[in-house]
Image (cartoon, grey):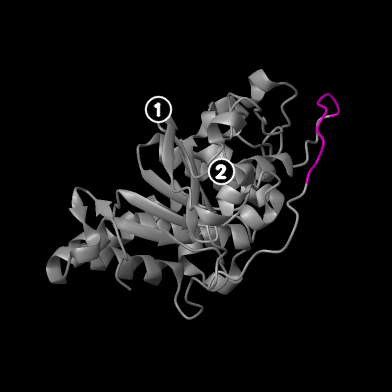
Amino acid sequence: MPAPSGQILFDGHDIAHLKGAALRRARGGMQMVFQDPYSSLSPRQTIQAMLDEAIAASGGSDRAERQQRSRELIERVGLSRSVLERNAHHLSGGQRQRVAIARALSVRPSLLICDEPVSALDVSVRAQIVNLLLDLRDEHLAILMIAHDLAVVRLLADHVAVMYLGRLVEVADTHELFERPLHPYTKALIASVPDPSPFVEHDLTSIEGEIPDPAHPPSGCRFRTRCPFQQQRCVEDDPGLRSIEGRHRAACHFAEELSSDGVAMPAATMGQPATDRSERSAAHDRRDRPHASP
């Protein structure tokens, strides 16, 4: 499906207009990790065969070379070599997702697209996968994360784009967005996250109303039917995404007024709750990574 407007730039090229060999080369630089590790892997192939196929597609034609590369990949994602001789249905959900990440890494991509990669996993396994993704990010692999879990977003992302009903409503650096959200939808999302710490007062709020039909969105601002700050201007005029301060952009007519009323996100934890704001603001530091038993 062609992009209705704008550009999709990857490595300096607009991939929406690439064709043939140029498109195939661009695809080799980006790989996908899907949400469901139970349906994204073939049940009929061994893990070795799956990795062999991916490595061969990227130019690894020598059998010994492919096997060595497979061993390196499987160990890189924290699994033992014995996994290579097994089929996917013999593995747990966490192991399958690690295999999916290994397969994505097999072609040495510069961009990893992760679609809800931990939402189908148990909490302890989630932490292991998040730590693996953090390690990959620290190795300068770009990761595009699609997620509803704000704790995961805050731990992994350097820059966040919030979407509502198919439109971007706020874009900002992670710390700035969670400490000073400028769009009512972002504020409501953050305020709806429970805080497990007994030392932090936090009043949970919910987003009122029903989600409109995406095929027939409301006029003006798409969030206005559920927004507590709605005014007549919101009905008549689509605010559009605009710069408020530096790289912080929001699609709200009243973003400047709302900026003075910050809503800090509760401790974004998956194993180790932070007890004050200074701890929460260090979410990207290694010591604040989620913990899980092996």
Identify which residue is drawn at 58% across, 24% down: 282
Q: Position of residue 195 (x, y in %)?
A: 78, 36
Q: Could you tell me the amino acid type at mark 1?
A: Gly
Identify which residue is drawn at 35% across, 59% down: 31
Q: Which quarter of the rendering shows the C terminus?
A: top right
> Which dot marks residue 60?
none
Say above or below: 47 vs 292.
Answer: below
Q: Residues within 10 Å of mark 2 (few under 14, many from 20)?
A: some
Q: Could you tell me the amino acid type at mark 2?
A: Val
Q: Which quarter of the rendering shows the N terminus?
A: bottom left
> Which dot marks residue 153?
2
Q: Nearer the viewer, mark 2 or mark 1?
A: 1
Based on the picture, tell me whether residue 202 belongs to the magenta stretch: yes
Q: Which residue is mark 1?
A: 246
Give 2 or 38, whichever is nearer the viewer. Answer: 2
Picture mark count:
2
Give 210 or 219, whichever is nearer the viewer. Answer: 219
SS label for mark 2: helix
SS label for mark 1: loop
Task: Give the distance between the C-alpha atoms of the residues marked 2 and 1, in whole angstroms.
Answer: 21 Å
Which quadrant would residue 5 be assigned to in this image? bottom left
Apparent side of residue 93 relative to residue 43 in the rendered image (left or right): right
Say above or below: 279 vs 157.
Answer: above
Q: Residue furthest left?
A: 21
Q: Residue furthest top?
A: 278
Based on the picture, tell me whether residue 83 belongs to the magenta stretch: no
Give 51 or 235, whichever is nearer the viewer. Answer: 235
Segment tinted magenta in the rendering = 198-205
Identify which residue is drawn at 19% across, 65% down: 17
